[in-house]
Image (cartoon, helix red, strand yellow):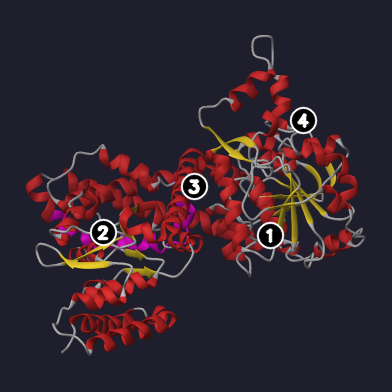
Amino acid sequence: MTCIWNKNFTNNASRFKTRFPELYEILLPHFESVSKFLSQAEENCTVENDINILNKIFQFWDFSFSKDNNLTVKENGVFLHSGYSPIREVQKLFSCSEADDEDISWIFASIGLGYAPLEFAKTNSSNLIVIIEPDPGFLFASMCALDWSPIFNHEKCIIITETNPEQIIPLLDSLHVIEKSKIITNSAQTQHQKLWFTNFFTLLERNKQKQNINTNTLERFSSLWLKNSAKNLKSFSTCSGIEIYKDMLERKIPSVVCAAGPTLEAVLPYLNQIKNKAVIIAVDTALRALLRYNIEPDFILLIDPQYYAANHIAGLTSSSSVLITESSVYPSVMRFNCRKKVLCESLFPLGQYFETKLLPNKSLGKITAGGSVSTSAWDFAKYIGSKKIYMAGLDLGYPENKTHIKGSTFEEKSHSSSNKLTPAENNLCSILFSASNEKSVNYQNDEIITDSKMKLFAWWFESQIAKYPSYETYTLSSQSLKIPGMKISSIQELLNYPDCNNKMDLILSAEKRICNFDPELFAQALQELKATLSDLYEHAKKGYFLCDKILSEPAAKAESFARTKFEDLEKIDNFIMNSSAKNVAALVFPTQRQLDELLSKEKPYTSSILNSIQKSRIIYSQLKNAIKQYQKYL
């Protein structure tokens, strides 16, 4: 007798192979194994839907029929679906406002028998569906039990299985799924991989925190970044990129990254000796402390565009150092007295415009931004080819209740602004006893005070170290926040290294490479940008007035009038979307959150067409404002 479970699986496997051919090849041994078990079981099949076959093959579940005669399962005695009506149960999940939003991605984290994604796929054809199940055996159990046609017929669907949580987050991030997603999960359905899902949800939440921080930062500082970038265009056009240093150390010389944490104090007395054995990379906040010991680092990193970051090196001189910076930094940074200034790939659209247009490789050389200058310094050490990277003063917490190294910009500022009523110690106490502080452990498993922001940086290091295992990363202090993957080392280990007498030869040899802009081509590209922005402004202006004209019509006529103008608006939109200056203007264009807020202040129309026109009018208006800001400074 033909077994319904074998029929389901055969059909699903065939559709799976067509829809996800690469994943099918990876899972082929599993498909063949399940198919073999089903064929053997079918020989003794007495009824078409003999549930004993499923219970025999997939012993991690206890299959049964619900009151309305649909399959349901228990795992360790706990129902994963309703024992009465499992389909009606999941349909309730989609009776929410998010189900009507086509921009929301739906992430199904472990699916049980698969009722939730299957029911969603039947009614929502435009949303991206992401199915995550670390154990493929559970997917195969579902494909035996139910018809997966709605999933295979859905245009936007991703299945993720047999992988680590750390690998999934970058994938979801690259697909822009995380920022606007709805997570469907069930604690009972994730118990078989409890630790896996705990790690996944932790990483997902951290990534959302990072994106929220990025959005807040963009909304607050985008105008400053634009202004700085425009003022720095002259310096930007004449500086080399960090590409000249790429892999120059050939994994032969270690790097020491000096951050401004309190434990840097223990390393400073040895840095002059260490400098003969390693490349010294200092973050901007640590430079003042290094110079106090007459140590000029090989490289200094300052890529934060804010004024306070420029103050970290204000009034200082490091004549033998190279300053690694970014085109949007506060303009006074470009006047810092050092041996050489070199730029990394711009984080912002104005710099990216010139790099893409004028450089053969489209980049000055990329440093990954992890939210902290210390993360960027680590990435630069990796970029120049250090196999071993030692972190000094990367505490990400307050060891022995200290916040910064003596002589750092923060401490100097606290002392200079202190008085009888507000002594410097007040700043220390306000940090140590902040309500946002958390407790964690250091490398000795002793308690250390930290906070959510520093733990986010620690997660960045953890994820990058896991991503690049061939680069060994060490901390020089056992009192720092413990970071998985970052090993502990000693100052003596560094001192035991042989002197690298050719270090400066390697650096100077790298600097002979020319990696900058042709002045004439740069000036030409700038004029082209100004003209393109002007054209973009005129089209946004035309679109705005056209939308305004439509919405000023009486309600009875407005919709029909709008239909006659769709072609004109489409031409305007096509021009904007294909403009080479579109991404440049995007820097000071409102975030999605800001656009939603502007739209919420408008009175909604009963017509969906007029609501769309109203949204377009806001977008055209904001695009005009964004371009005006550029035209003010260019």
Q: Amino acid at mark 1?
A: Pro
- SS at mark 4? loop
Mark 1 or 4, nearer chain start:
4
Query: Which mark, residue 210?
Result: 3
Q: Amino acid at mark 2?
A: Leu
Displayed quadrant of residue 407: top right
Question: Which residues make up the magenta segment?
Answer: 561-588
Q: Position of residue 633 (x, y in %)?
A: 55, 43
| Residue for point 42% across, 62% down | 175
Whether 261 is drawn above or below 614: the answer is above
Q: Position of residue 586 (x, y in %)?
A: 45, 51
Whether 405 is drawn above or below 542: the answer is above
Residue ID for mark 1:
519
| Left-right relation of 571 to 609 | right
Residue ID for mark 2:
80
Does the magenta segment cover residue 305?
A: no
The answer to whether any part of residue 441 appears in the image is yes
Q: Nearer the viewer, mark 3 or mark 1?
A: 3
Pointer 3 with pointer 4, Cβ within 8 A: no
Sort mark 4 into few (<14), some (14-19) or many (20+) by Cα contacts within 10 Å.
many
The answer to whether any part of residue 317 appears in the image is no
Pointer 2 with pointer 1, Cβ within 8 A: no
Q: Amino acid at mark 4?
A: Lys
Q: Split into 4 quadrants, where in the image is the N terminus?
A: bottom left
- SS at mark 3? helix
Pointer 3 with pointer 2, Cβ within 8 A: no
